[in-house]
Amino acid sequence: MEPVAIVGVGMTEIMDNHLASNYADLVFEASQKALADAGMTIDQVDNVITISNDFFDGRTISSMAVMDACGSYDKNVSTVEGDGTFGAFYALMRVLSGSYETCLVCAHHKGSEGVMSLITNAMFDPIYERSLGIDAITSAALQARVYMERYGVSEEECALVSVKNHGNAFKNQVAQLPLKLTVEEVMASPYISDPLKLLDCSPVSDGASALILASKSRARQITEKPVWVKGVAHCCDAFHLGDRDLSSTRALEEAARKAYAMAGISDPGREIDVVELYDAFSYMELMWLEGLGFCERGEGGKLTSSGETAMDGRLPVNPSGGCLSGNPVVVAGLNRIIECALQVRGDAGEHQVEGVRTAIAHGINGPCGQSHCVWIMGGEA
Amino acid sequence: MENWRENQEIIVMEGRIKVPYTWAAGEVGTRYLETLRDQRKFMGTRCPRCEIVYHPPRRNCPDCFEECEDWVELGSQGELQSYTVVRRHHPQLSPLPLPFAYGIIKLDGADTGFLHILSDFQEGELAVGSRVEAVFAEEREGNIRDVLFFRPVKGVD
């Protein structure tokens, strides 16, 4: 793959309710921050991708409604409905096509303005599933049950993820929900849909983020700290929950295998320095760590309780606090990439992990991690 | 501008999007729902190549992309592959009063699971791998709720 770099990043604060900003205001803020970070002006951007979801926005063609806010006039634009990691993948392909040199990618979400359970219910099949009332949390609970029973993972091991990530969030200025928790407190939080308790679930969030991708020659002109995309892949599993072994991570394993091969990584546990993954629920961090190959299947809980994934561990996972500490859907995956870019640059601030050379960002799309997108980034082309 | 922001209450518009839709079940879905309604029977389709029996029935095998033309009658009992007891009632979503559960159920004769509601169970009675049976509505309309819910099969371990 021709080298492509992330040359600018911007995130709004993640909040439970960004009352003072509408969608467009959030997109404007994130875009401005990414341009300022890159030291670019909007006329130096030659094409734009916006990422959004119509149901969340409560409007159709939501992706076009924010074009004014990200400087798209007179530019080639396109849109992605899905997680930010997939939107950024499209932007990467545009740069790789050779037709574009710089692509601005923007994602926005205001969970505060809709009703999450009603909206996520609508992702399910209208003939066979929707009228049963299933939603994002109850479907995830079905996955958590299968995974935990198959591998003997305890609720306490999942709770450790919540303790760790909410604790990490104290050092991330954009995080919504830093919390000082104990495993006992997570265990004592009320069940929403067992085995998932309130503190196993990510919050409803508002936020926007943006990043700028540039071709090799442009990247070197724009910044002294380009973050190079070393490997990237995505892979999809079945849509219907009953068609899948919900404890399986085969789509993630395949995406990771391809991304590692592209990046020349043979031993991810040794070669990756930091991970930002999509922990919409605490159990997901364990499953995705296994799917990414950092431990054997079913060993994610042990890896976590050993402290290896803590800020001061061998492999810090979600030093930002992850989605558990703020989950603006569709933005959340883009934030994982941005967090990794900041880590590689050494610009992550208080939650900087020391000596990061290579980082992994991960996003999901569809119910219970139907599809996975894996990004590997590093400081050298 | 700065002074204006002090003590300013942000105006919030309220709305509700109501858009009627119709979703055609198609030929495959219609045959399935009709059989459920008229005969209280579950049907699946079988892939001619990998022989996986899909429930709900599918026009094509998602695995090998073959067209599934064989219909297979399935049992109205099956194995519970996963479940979650819902602890928070949602006025617009919850299909039954609490306590109820969601389950993924692999009916006898099927190779895939399907999503449905579980009710009429005791606390702690549900388990992965346990046997459950369908309870049909008296008045059936040709939709998935013609099955009221699944419940544990009594007296079987």
Image (tube, helix red, strand yellow):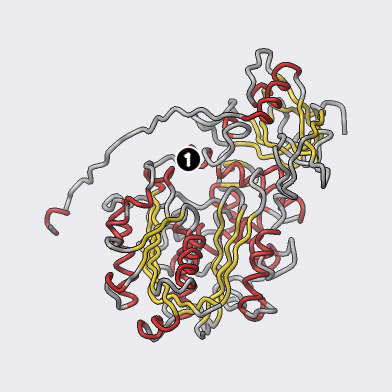
Residue receiving disc 1: A119
Residue A222 location (% of width, % of height): 35, 82
Q: Is residue A294 left or right of residue A21?
A: right
Q: Residues within 10 Å of mark 1 (few under 14, many from 20)?
A: some
Q: From the viewer's side, name the closer residue of A323 and A6.
A: A6
Query: Measured along the vertical axis of the image, is residue B65 above or below residue A157?
Result: above
Q: From the viewer's side, name the closer residue of A351 and A237.
A: A237
Count of marks, rendered view: 1
Q: From the viewer's side, name the closer residue of A188 and B58.
A: B58
Q: Is residue B12 left or right of residue B84?
A: left
Residue A112 location (% of width, % of height): 38, 46
Residue at 31 percent across and 69 percent down: it is A33
Residue A159 visible to an observer of this rendering: no
Query: Measured along the vertical axis of the image, is residue A225 above or below residue B14?
Result: below
Residue at 55 percent across and 70 percent down: it is A375
Residue B26 location (% of width, % of height): 62, 30
Q: Mark 1 falls on what kind of element? A: helix
Q: Which image quadrant for residue A372?
A: bottom right
Residue A37 location (% of width, % of height): 33, 75
Task: Check the residue under mark 1 and report the chain it is in.
Answer: A
Q: Is residue B112 left or right of residue A172?
A: right
The N terminus of chain A is located in which quarter? bottom right
Query: Measured along the vertical axis of the image, is residue A351 above or below residue A24?
Result: below
Residue A363 visible to an observer of this rendering: yes
Query: Measured along the vertical axis of the image, is residue A150 above or below residue A29?
Result: above
Q: Amino acid at mark 1?
A: Ile
